[in-house]
Amino acid sequence: MRNYIKLLSFLKGHKKLFSLAVFTMFIASLFEGVQLSILVPLTDRIFNKTAIVVPSKLPAFLNQAVERLNSTSPETLFWVLPIFVAVLMVLKHCFTYTYQYLMNDVAQRVLRDVRSRLFNKIQNLSLDYFSARRTGELVSRITHDVQIIENAVSYGVTDLFRQTFMITIYITIAFSIHPVAALIILLIFPAIGVPISQIGRKLKKLARSTQERMADINSILLETISGVRVVKAFCTEKRESEKFHGKNHDYYKLKMKAVKRLQLISPITELFGMICGMIIIFWLGRQVMDGDLSFGIFVLFFGSLMSVISPVKKLGNVNALTQQALSANERIYAILDQQPSVREKEGAVDIPALRDRIELKNVSFAYDQESGTVLQDINLEIKKGELVAIVGPTGVGKSTLANLIPRFYDATQGEVLIDGVNVKEVSFKSLRLQTGIVAQETFLFNDTVRVNIAYGAPQASRQEIETAAKRAYAHEFILGMPQGYDTVIGDRGFRLSGGEKQRVTIARAILKNPAILILDEATSQLDSQSEKYVQEALDLLMEGRTVVAIAHRLSTIKKADKIVVLERGGIVGQGKHEELLGTCELYNQLHKTQFHL
């Protein structure tokens, strides 16, 4: 029930529109009930020219209406009936169109809001959340799962109210004609809920598995499309196709299991309808033959109860849709209820640009309890304007240490201070706007070169963008592209080489003009020619900034003001290049290995 309430909470911001839709739906249902209850007895009165006979006592206003119809000649009713029916039909369809439009509007608003909430939530989650989640799984929740929610609102909620109104109206008509017969029939009807409920529970389980398979499909699609170069380089197209076909077939089998159970709803309800119909015919048919009940009223009673079957059938489908939506709802709220591990403190202050130093005091860090400690008791001081290089074996925690400065992660123990202020006390925006990052793995958006360079400074002028590109040694190759700065570079910068992507990234950092610069192995994967251009661009970028450089190649950081050597999560040496060669055994080994001494 709690999950269902959370599902309905998506309607919270659209109460007025939803209420109006339900009201117009009720009016449309009333017109449909009136149409049936008037049309059948009138046609019997007109064409059979017999009086309308009702066995039970009706309310006074209905008795008066029946008496008036019986006293009116069939010829008069013949001319009035078509006009009356036409007016009813027009009014019914006007209200039907209105409620259908309004309910679809509500559904699309819900769809829009849920997607926006999910996207905003994902944007605000900490980096550690994404390290444990597949991109395709998150995409599936925003697309496939939200689509299921839309179906539950646009069709499920609509039918829930609409069919409930229709059942109420038809039952009211039946009870007003023959209360005893209607009561007996309705005592039989609840038995239909048992198999439908079991089908719904099974569909919920199948929906969860189906949504997981769709997440698998999305993950494979994203991986193989973004990694198409690797796939083609290793000639693994067939293997990837087989993997995709396997997941796709699993999804197909689950969907067919759901279809098989959905199709059971119709014959089950039809079977119960047949049983009820036989009871009505054998019981009330005798009263028609004896003259205690007019044929038109018998048809009205029979039609009213038989008309309940269709709404019940649709409510069974509503239950199936709802169970699938509840499963999707759980997956959506698994994201919406997720709390970021790194949160901005309420009342966080804006910190000015770095004036003096960055300090890490007794800092330890672990991603989680299972992975163990990554950094242990780190004490490090980085003065303004210094170039501090961090070196050490792969997996020792170099990038993790740098990521603590802009608060991508929080230290498990200890403090990270900027000018004596703990980074946990300052706003994300003021901290990260003064921090620039050029990483080993560049990321560019599927947009123009101009937009990618100006990503951190969207208000930058054309001249400022081109100046940044010139300083990054990117201007010349950009002008050689088909549309220059307005060339779309493809997904993840697919149309650019590694060196070109890196220089566009550097131009982006130059335009941002950060006080603190983090270089995370920015040249480690480039060829010699590209590295030359990128290194020259980095030298310009580093001028006048506080730089933390993570590097495997010692040749790139010999001129650093301070080199920090990490081993097993701790600092085993600090100093300049020449000093460390004589005092730090690990640094000496790294130097000998790289220069083959």
Image (cartoon, rainbow, N blue to C red):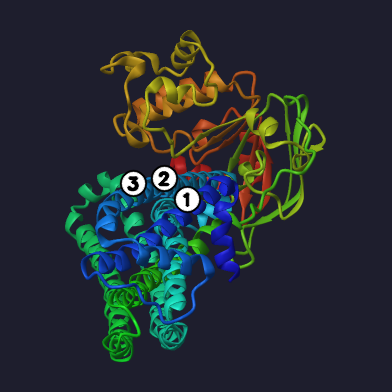
Question: What element does badge 1 sit on?
Answer: helix
Q: Which image quadrant: the N terminus?
A: bottom right
Quadrant of residue 473 within the rendered picture: top left
What amino acid does circle 2 point to? Thr
Residue 354 as seen in the image, left or right of residue 171? right
Vertical placement of 323 versus 339: above or below?
below
Q: Is residue 131 visible?
A: yes
Q: Amino acid at mark 1?
A: Thr
Residue 82 % position (x, y): 26, 52
Q: Check residue 90 in the rendering and tell me which mark sits there, or answer none.
A: 3
Q: Position of residue 448 (x, y in %)?
A: 37, 23
Q: Is residue 578 left or right of residue 473?
A: right
Q: Amino acid at mark 3?
A: Val
Tell me the distance, in whole angstroms, between the alpha carbons under discs 3 and 2: 12 Å
User: Measuring 35% from the left and 32% from the top, which residue is drawn there?
Assistant: 493
Q: Is residue 425 above or below residue 332?
A: above
Numbered label attached to residue 24: 1
Residue at horizontal 28 percent and vertical 55 percent from the top: 76
Question: Is residue 213 something that shows in the picture?
Answer: no
